[in-house]
């Protein structure tokens, strides 16, 4: 009798191998990453402290309280402008119009000061904020390049300034003993109101950037506008708001400067946009967007002011050397940021 062999079942297919797990970063790698991030954000503070300590030993007058007041009051106007520039650059943009808007704000404030404190303060805010709004609308809604748009408004704001002052022949003066003049020349404990205003604005800016959804949106938009759009973030509205804020802050700084000088000087603000960008980048904010800090910008502004003051202390050098030193710092910082970014990616 024929025996039938039981049918053998086909072997089950082997289960696919799970991909090898990526080894977790060791303490050495995570430590290097944290160190690179800390150096990128706060390295300028270490440089600033080193320069200040060294200068205090070399030049005894540098460490005086009067000199500190002079340095900080001069830095306060650039600081207010750089605050707005920081938020613009974090979103991946640029604002070249702030120097001309700063000068225009000063002229408008000086002209309007004859009508009272509120007029002197509100007119530059409305006009300069409107210029920032125009920048943001053309960039966000018109999909135009920030460089081109803000270069156009740089020329437009300077042209409007010249038209208001008869090609610079007319200088509007702030009335003596006016409340608006006191805003620029008054002080608390020896430190001028512009310094206090700048510090308050930086404190508020830091809170907005780190503690609000709007601040987090700035980083997301700067990291990738397309990804931010997919996440449902209001990319266009965010860009419009930051450029409007940049125009408002530039106009406010110009008004404070006019109150300080008791006049609307027409030749101020030339190249100020480059100083603001330098301070922001030296402070650790990436030009490509997506990373930055308010505190870093403040240290960058103070470092540039200290460098200018040291050049004045030396006496044998003129102020043009500040541009040379600032440019050197900027190159070093950009190279360092590139190296640190690669180091963070590799870890």
Image (cartoon, rainbow, N blue to C red):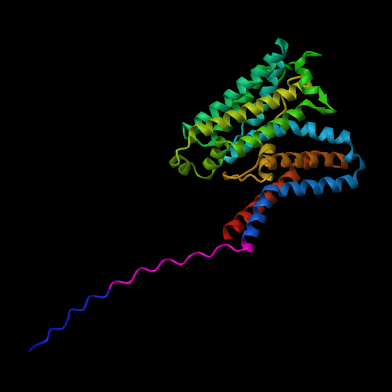
Give how far across and how far down residue 92 sits, in percent. Answer: 56, 41
**Marker count (numbered):** 0
Residue lying farthest top?
A: 115
Is 14 placed above or below 115 here? below
Q: Nearer the viewer, residue 250 or 325?
A: 250
- In this rendering, the answer to whether 316 lies above or below 346 is above
Q: Which residues are magenta?
A: 12-29
Q: Horizontal and vertical percent for residue 15?
A: 34, 69
* For residue 164, above or below residue 51: above
Along the line of sight, which residue is nearer the eye, 82 or 309?
82
- State the image coordinates of residue 199 (x, y, percent, origin top left): 73, 32
Query: What residue lies at 46% left-to-right and 31% top-to-bottom?
Result: 141
Q: Main secondary structure of the magenta part?
A: loop
Q: Is residue 61 magenta?
A: no
Question: Would you identify the image quadrant in which residue 314 lies?
Answer: top right
Is residue 24 part of the magenta span, yes or no?
A: yes
Left or right of 314, for residue 280: left
- Please tell me which residue is depicted at 66% across the width and 46% down the height of the picture: 284
Query: 135 or 4: which is nearer to us?
Result: 4
Residue sticking out furthest to the right: 60
Instruction: Kindly tell me whether residue 154 is visible in this rendering.
Output: no
């Amino acid at each position: 009798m024929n025996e039938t062999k039981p049918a053998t079942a086909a072997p089950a297919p082997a289960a696919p191998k799970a991909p090898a797990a990526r080894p977790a970063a060791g303490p050495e790698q995570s430590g290097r990453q944290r160190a690179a991030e800390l150096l990128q954000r706060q390295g300028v503070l270490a440089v600033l402290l080193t320069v200040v300590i060294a200068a205090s030993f070399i030049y005894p007058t540098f460490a005086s309280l009067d000199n500190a007041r002079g340095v900080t009051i001069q830095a306060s106007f650039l600081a207010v402008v750089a605050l707005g520039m920081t938020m613009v650059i974090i979103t991946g943009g640029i604002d070249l119009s702030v120097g001309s808007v700063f000068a225009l704000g000063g002229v408008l404030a000086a002209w309007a000061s004859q009508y009272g404190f509120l007029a002197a303060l509100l007119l530059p805010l409305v006009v300069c904020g409107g210029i920032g709004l125009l920048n943001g609308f053309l960039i966000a809604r018109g999909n135009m390049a920030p460089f081109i748009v803000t270069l156009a408004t740089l020329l437009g704001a300077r042209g409007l300034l010249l038209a208001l002052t008869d090609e610079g022949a007319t200088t509007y003066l702030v009335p003596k003993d006016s409340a608006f003049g006191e805003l620029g020349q008054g002080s608390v404990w020896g430190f001028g109101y512009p310094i206090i205003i700048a510090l308050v604005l930086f404190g508020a800016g830091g809170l907005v950037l780190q503690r609000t959804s709007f601040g987090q949106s700035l980083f997301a938009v700067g990291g990738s506008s397309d990804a931010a759009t997919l996440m449902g973030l209001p990319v266009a509205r965010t860009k419009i708001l930051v450029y409007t804020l940049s125009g408002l802050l530039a106009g406010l700084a110009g008004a404070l400067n006019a109150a300080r000088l008791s006049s609307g000087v027409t030749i101020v603000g030339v190249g100020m946009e480059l100083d603001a960008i330098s301070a922001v980048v030296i402070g650790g904010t990436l030009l490509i967007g997506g990373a930055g800090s308010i505190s870093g910008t403040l240290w960058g502004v103070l470092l540039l002011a200290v460098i200018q003051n040291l050049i004045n202390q030396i006496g044998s050098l003129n102020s043009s050397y500040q541009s040379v030193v600032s440019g050197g710092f900027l190159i070093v910082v950009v190279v360092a940021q590139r190296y640190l970014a690669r180091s963070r990616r590799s870890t």
